[in-house]
Amino acid sequence: MKNFQNKAKIVKFSKIIRSILFAGLILWIIAIPGLLAAFFLPIFFHSNTHTTADTYKGVGAILTLPFVFAANLYFFKFFDRLKNGHLFDAQTIGYLETAGKWLIAIGLFQALFSGVEGLITHSQNITFSGDGIFSGLVTIFTAWLFREGQELQEEQELTV
């Protein structure tokens, strides 16, 4: 009975997180054209308000958008599977693992872009945080725990 109650709580919580992630996907779809327009319109109209560093950071942010969208999409798919009660399912775990890989890709891209930015702008003030890489590793570790749970569940089903 307790197992059913815990699963019901997980499904309920997953519905909430899934709704938030769905809103995030909608915002991404709306925001991406707006961000692109806000960045490229001043360049198109030859506005001199952008410095080289600002332009470089804008390009970096724009190039990062597909990575962030993909990570958000796979987290959405993961919580959608949880919402439907597929806790220890190979596809569910695959979505979580893929989201983690996208987070690592974001972190690596940001690190690469920060290094190149320092070379191009000759700035001594370049900082990098490894948040994306760390988040991706934690997510992949969590997927590994889910995979272990899946194997335990399959083993338990065989012994009953």
Image: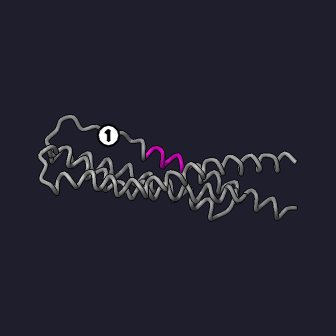
Left or right: residue 4 versus residue 74 is right
Q: Main secondary structure of the magenta part?
A: helix
**Image coordinates for residue 119, horizontal then vertical, percent:** 16, 46
Q: Kindly state the secondary structure of the residue where label 1 is placed.
A: loop
Is 138 magenta? The answer is yes
Vertical comparison of 118 with 44: above or below: above
Q: Nearer the viewer, residue 81 or 148?
A: 81
| Disc 1 packing (10 Å; few <14; some 14–19; many ≥20) | few
Q: Position of residue 116 (x, y in %)?
A: 21, 49
Residue ranking furthest to the front: 45
Magenta-drawn stretch contains 62: no
- Which residue is painted at 54% across and 49% down in the image? 139
- In the rendered view, tell whether residue 51 sits above or below residue 45: above
Is the residue 88 above or below the residue 17 in the image? below
Which residue occupies the foreground of this view, 70 or 127?
A: 70
Locate residue 70: give its quadrant. Answer: bottom left
**According to the image, label 1 marks what residue?**
128
Indicate the colouring scheme: one colour
Q: Residue at x 15, y 55 (%)?
A: 45
> From the viewer's perspective, is 23 left or right of 156?
left
What span is in magenta?
A: 133-139
Q: Which residue is drawn at 82% across and 62% down?
A: 157
As shown in the figure, which amino acid type bears the numbered disc 1? Answer: Phe
Q: In which quarter of the image is the C terminus?
A: bottom right
Q: Residue at x 32, y 52 (%)?
A: 35
Residue 29 screen position, x and y as percent: 43, 58
The residue most toward the top is 125
Task: Please name whichever residue, 43 or 108, is drawn nearer the observer in this view of the structure.
Answer: 43
- The x, y position of residue 154, in whole percent, is 76, 62
